[in-house]
Amino acid sequence: MLQVNAFHSIRHSITAFAVAATLFAGSAQAVDVTGAGSTFVQPIVTKWSATYAEKTGNHINYGGGGSGAGIAQIKAATIDFGASDKPLSPDELSAAGLGQFPIVIGGVVPVVNIEGVKAGEIKLTGAQLGDIYLGKIKKWNDPALAANNAGVKLPDAAIQVVSRSDGSGTTFNYTNYLSKVNAEWKEKVGEGTSVQWPVGVGGKGNAGVAAYVQQINGSIGYVELAYALQNKMAYTQVQNSAGKFVTPNLASFAAAASHADWKSAKDFQLVITNAPGDDSWPITATAFALIYKTPKDAAHSKAVVDFFKYAYSEGGKAAEALDYVPLPAALVAQIEAYWKAEVKL
Amino acid sequence: MAASAESIAIPQSDEQRARRDGFADRLFRRIVAGAGIFVLVTLAGVALTTLWGGREAFATFGFKFLASSEWDTVGKQFGALAPVYGTLVTAAIALIIAVPVSFGIALYLTEIAPPWLRTPVASAIELLAGIPSIIYGMWGLFVFVPIMGRYIIPWLNDHVGEWPVIGGLFKGPPLGLGMLTAGIVLAIMIIPFISSVMREVFLTVPTRLKESAYALGSTTWEVAWDIVLPYTRTAVIGGIFLGLGRALGETMAVTFVLGNVHRLSLSLLEPGNSIAATIANEFAEADSEIFRSSLIALAFLLFVVTFIVLAIAKLMLRQMEKKEGK
């Protein structure tokens, strides 16, 4: 009798607990989710999370800190999602139990400061960009540059090369592009979030590079599009893999993103520089989110996925306002399929 | 009776008081000793953790880490020579400029300036010392770098650049950035520290010493050089080393104007790198173990460099005192 009573009361309390738990989950309590990593996506993720919080009450706290920090922290499971400018390989992902998908598209833009040269006037091939950054093309009136710049008056001035001194995804995408189009660059310097620059000076951050280029006559640097536009800098046209010279803007970034071969990229491991297509900007970049495939805290991971669903479907305008390009629809469909297949929620 | 009671009571309370004082004194000693040991523990902690964190770099590259200026993050070859060199050169430039200027400021404020001007200028110096370094860096980048690039560096190239021996130091592209610019910005940053220490200690020189010298017919310069400076030398050198320590470890201001490249160049007009700037620039995206370890090893080297510089200073000071027969 006593035992039965005890059993009853235990069963009661279990039922009560289960009911409470369902109520708790059902009432969709606000979830606080933390992410960190790429500073490249920080402005847009912050913007999205503000509008998302208004809509759902869930807070997405994004800490920036750099891609390296984002990767380290998601591996250590101190955050709910990481963001990286450089895709991880499927091997590295599976070793850490992580899944990966693109967040947003942006682009890297060469900018120059040459007296009398306006935005979009100078045309450069990828090979020439590589040679300039290798220190092989030393002057703006070098005959090699004159060949594709008929009509532009290039001065007899030394080229001052400006690069990023801090490790960054911008540098990764830029050097990745140079490695694809300039064999000597690939062999001597290679690609990375920071590399050993053969010539020139290094500025800290996009802002540092922009400031150096604006102050040094005859300089060339590379920044994200937003910085080039905000500072009214003279960006260059660059020849893409189809041989066409294109102007950097959201349309040419979007073209590169849609022409890129995402279908055959396992875990979306694809750097879309030098993408095919007549109107593709050659130095287009993607930022990637990293989440656990088997989450320790399902509610948090569900909120992360839900947040990105919202960002893809309703965050396009906000992205464009900040000079990012929303992902093409086909890619979004592919990501949603990937979530279904790979992430256990 | 009353007197005898008193005579008993007094030694008792004396004894109590002595015991209480003894306890308070011991407690005070322990607290102060703890504060002193805290410094040693911090020092040892920083040294050991940076040495431990950098062990992979030291083990992999060995002596080459000190002797090589290669910093190839892709090929994973790291050498600390360029940042160590840049750190020493920029700090040296800063001291060469800051010490005489600070001496002038302190002397003016204690000996020459009219009394109503002394306090406002002294407060202004202390205010300057409180400005965060990033402000100096931004001022350097947006205001000073264009001036250097447009006027000063072309002038140096045309005039000083042709001189024998030291000409090579002043030949370079008119970027405006570089080790000379960084040194000058550092000098401006450390002048408030050095000059306010100098002013404080110049004020401690007894008036009778100075007035005796004036009475014997000394000029103001002679009083400053022969009376004030010898009297305050230890403290003045202490002030200079406070400034030097700041110059060696300064990060943000230097990062903005130094150019941040791992190349060794003789010319002061070329961009360079410093230890603190390298760490600040590259730590966030250091994506391999050996890269991260090399940066921590750099931090250890900064520690060692500072230690060596301070030790040399102490030795010099002792030599000077020996010469004087103290």
Image (cartoon, grey):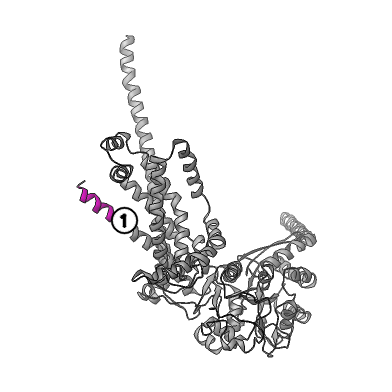
Query: A279 and B227: which one is in front?
Result: B227
Residue A134: x, y in percent? 52, 83
Q: Nearer the viewer, residue A216 or B260?
A: A216
Image quadrant in which you'd find residue A61: bottom right
| Secondary structure that dominates the magenta span | helix
Q: Residue A128 in the image: state x and y as whole percent.
A: 58, 86
| Residue B158 counted in the magenta span | no
Query: Residue drawn at (51%, 85%), measured in percent from left and top?
Result: A136
| Any part of residue A292 in sight | no
Please provide percent x and percent y for residue B29: 36, 40
Q: Amino acid at mark 1?
A: Ala
A181 sits left or right of A230 in the view: left
Q: Residue at x 27, y 35 (%)?
A: B215
Q: Is residue B224 above or below residue A180?
A: above
Q: Which residue occupies the extreme left position in the image?
A: B325
**Looking at the image, residue A72 lies above or below residue A330:** above
Q: Is residue B144 left or right of residue B320?
A: right
What quarter of the picture does the C terminus of chain A occupy? bottom right
In the image, residue A151 sits, relative to residue B173, either above or below, namely below
Output the chain of dot 1. Answer: B
Residue beneath label 1, please? B313
Q: Residue A229's image quarter?
A: bottom right
Residues shaded magenta:
B312-324
Q: Nearer the viewer, residue A320 or A42?
A: A320
Left/right placement of residue B35 relative to residue B211 reads right
> Does the segment drawn in magenta span residue B316?
yes
State the SS at label 1: helix
Relative to A240, say whether B247 is above or below. above
Q: Residue furthest front?
A: B159
